[in-house]
Image: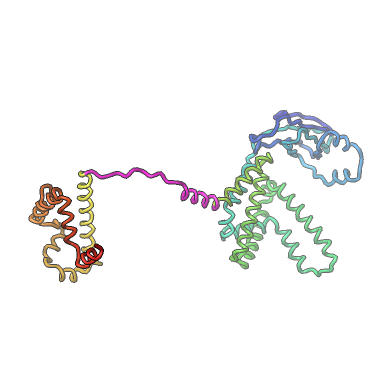
Amino acid sequence: KDGQEIKVQAAQHFCYNNSIVPGWRETWTRIQVRVWSTAKLKVTVVNDEQDLQELEHFSIWKLVQYFVREQTNEATVSVSLFNNKTCFRVDPSDSRTLYAVQPSRHFDVYLFLVFLAGLLLFFFADSLSRSQVFYYSAGMSTGMIASLIILIFVIGRFLPKKSPFYVLLMGGWSFSLYVIQLVLRNLQIILKDHWHLAIGYSIVVGFISFAVCYRYGPLVDKRSINILSWTLQIFGLLLVYAGIQVQQVALAIMIAAFCSKNMEYPSTKVFMLYQKLKPKKLEPRHLLTEEEYQRQSEVETQKALEELRKYCSSPEFNTWKTVSRIQSPQRFADFIEGSPHLLSNEVSVHTQEYGLGGSFFEDELFSTDEENQEEEEGWETDDDKTYKSRAE
């Protein structure tokens, strides 16, 4: 059971029964069985109990696997959420030494961080492929992690095409991958006990990797940048898939991320086209009352006069040319300083003529249709009269 710790001796078989059906809540849930002891031990994982029985029978391949498998004081067995039963065998080096076995089901922070890193890498692949900081940091990281593989690749380029050393080269690739896996597995011990060697290796290999990246320079060609961007997007989707335990949830998030990134431009165009074709609802026009009309006219007039004063005071305005053309320069100067643009007698004359009760208002109010027709006929030209007579 989860959280239960048992202590046993000698070689034993164990099976973990998973009774929970995985759903979206188990997206970042990990099931692990921890085995540890003061003595060295080996753990062999199989699918079911039948495979455990086959381990008891002797075979050359099982013997090779037994000697290749590494002995440790602590081992962790990862249990798949979709397997109903996972079995394993523990072989301690000393049958009299106790070892403990404890299963656990917990939220895995590392899985969530892998998922988050893949999501960020997918969405920011375009900007990262053009970033010089990312170019140099990625080059240095690749050099420090895969320096042995790169060294074997460089040596292979100088070997003749028909050379027996190619067999050694293939073995070197396998050996390099094994060394990388071994270093990553014991990284904590290396950083704790041999930290000075780790720092020296990082400085030397990091400087060489930086020099190589600086020699060739960042990517400039557009096609190369696109290839790097697509590679980062694919790698980001793989990290998203690796960071989620439930396969259906992983595929759904990958499809949603792909659509949201690549369907943004078409969806924007479709929305803009819909906005243009959508029939617009006509709102009733608001008609101004007499008071609103007077208030708006006063406000807009004062606003226009202020703009005129600012323009006349600006360096762009040709003062001497304007003064030479107007009849009263002193009145123009007073207007710029803030005086009213109309005199008191001009205001009174305008009010008497166009105001309420003025002559213009009375003429418009009491004019008849016959007078309007006579005025229209008075504007007729001789050509119009000649045309009418001919038509008659």
Q: Residue at x 20, y 50 (%)?
A: 298
Question: Farthest residue toward the front?
Answer: 392
Report the front residue among 83 and 324: 324
Q: Looking at the image, how many numbered discs can be counted on the residues?
A: 0
Residue closest to the eye, 326 or 171: 326
Task: State the image coordinates of residue 220 (x, y, percent, origin top left).
Answer: 58, 66
Q: Which residues are magenta?
A: 265-289
Horizontal side of 385 relative to 153 (left or right) equals: left
Q: Which coloring applies here? A: rainbow
The residue sitting at 66% across, 43% down in the picture is: 251
Quadrant including the N terminus: top right
Residue 65 showing in the rendered view: yes
Report the front residue among 112 and 96. 112
Q: Position of residue 138 (x, y in %)?
A: 62, 57
Q: Position of residue 181 (x, y in %)?
A: 74, 50
Q: Nearer the viewer, residue 361 or 321?
A: 361
Measured from the top left, where is residue 58 in percent x and y?
Answer: 92, 40
Judge whether 111 appears above or below 171 on screen.
above
**Which residue lies at the image location 20% right of the left edge and 44% below the top edge?**
290
Q: Quadrant of residue 282?
A: top left
| Residue drawn at the location 18% of the way across and 62% of the way down | 379
The answer to which quarter of the image holds residue 133 is bottom right
Examine the rendering and report whether any part of residue 110 can be seen: no
Q: Is residue 93 above or below residue 123?
A: above
Would you place residue 276 above or below residue 76 in this image? below
Q: Residue furthest left?
A: 345
Q: Quadrant of the C terminus?
A: bottom left
Residue 264 belongs to magenta span: no
Asked if residue 284 lies in the magenta stretch, the reply is yes
